[in-house]
Image (tube, rainbow, N blue to C red):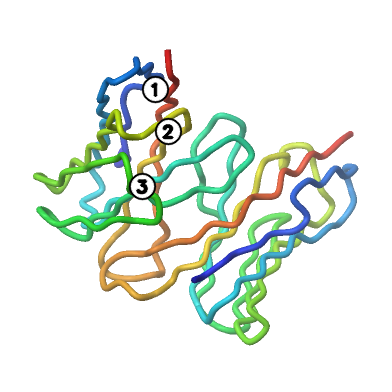
Amino acid sequence: ELKVEQNPLFLSMQEGKNYTIYCNYSTTSDRLYWYRQDPGKSLESLFVLLSNGAVKQEGRLMASLDTKARLSTLHITAAVHDLSATYFCAVDEGRIQGAQKLVFGQGTRLTINP
Amino acid sequence: DGGITQSPKYLFRKEGQNVTLSCEQNLNHDAMYWYRQDPGQGLRLIYYSQIVNDFQKGDIAEGYSVSREKKESFPLTVTSAQKNPTAFYLCASSARQGPNQPQHFGDGTRLSIL
């Protein structure tokens, strides 16, 4: 059974600082997704990582995937208040044709203080 | 604009009552999904459908039922057998052609018990 664990679960940081969120998973997969959720809202796709060594960047966020270590990281550079949200990683079990059977981490609630 | 529409936004269920949550998409996606999110938790898969007239149980299907009579529509019924239905329910869809397209999510329905 695939398990996905994120850490930390809560992160409070100051604007301008750098930090990293970690996503570990328990069984082999090379399909990992990062999503953002604002309070009471839906999920917004951030990154799709589909191979070992994949790295994607968008603004102050950068995500990477190491399939051998079963680890993905989401790095935040020079944080700004607008990045306050809950961030989820999700791993595809990869056993279904034509669909994605995702297992989500618990989420990391990020608060960025002025 | 293409997207996923969930209704209603808020729903209240009485004891012993079945309620149905609507999900409609105009993205021409083949696969559709239902997730449940409890406060401070990640998403858990209830049901998914890869194609019209076919659907599969996810990890927490007990007390729920679905139908997929049209490509655009994937309603979820929360039955009276679901003893703890209070949660945020999210519908999603994805394109059939591959893992490089992330799932798109609707805005969710918040279900509470009266």
| Relative depth, front residue between A60 and B9 | B9
Mark 3, other Cα within 10 Å: few <14 / some 14–19 / many ≥20: many
Name which residue type carries label 1: Lys
Name which residue type carries label 3: Ala
Q: Chain of mark 1?
A: B
Q: Are marks 1 and 2 in contact (CB under 8 Å)?
A: yes
C-alpha gap between disc 1 and disc 3: 15 Å
The residue wearing badge 3 is B92
Quadrant housing the C terminus of chain A: top right
- Helix, strand or loop under label 1: loop
State whether discs 1 and 2 lie on one chain: yes
- Earlier residue among tags 3 and 2: 3
The residue wearing badge 1 is B9
Residue B50 is situated, as x and y percent measured from the top left of the image, at 22, 60
Q: Which mark is residue B107?
A: 2
The residue at 29%/54% (across/down) is B48
- Helix, strand or loop under label 2: loop
User: Compared to B99, does B6 lie above or below?
Assistant: above
Q: Which mark is residue A41?
A: none
In the picture as drawn, the residue positioned furthest to the bottom comes out as A68
Q: Are marks 1 and 3 in contact (CB under 8 Å)?
A: no
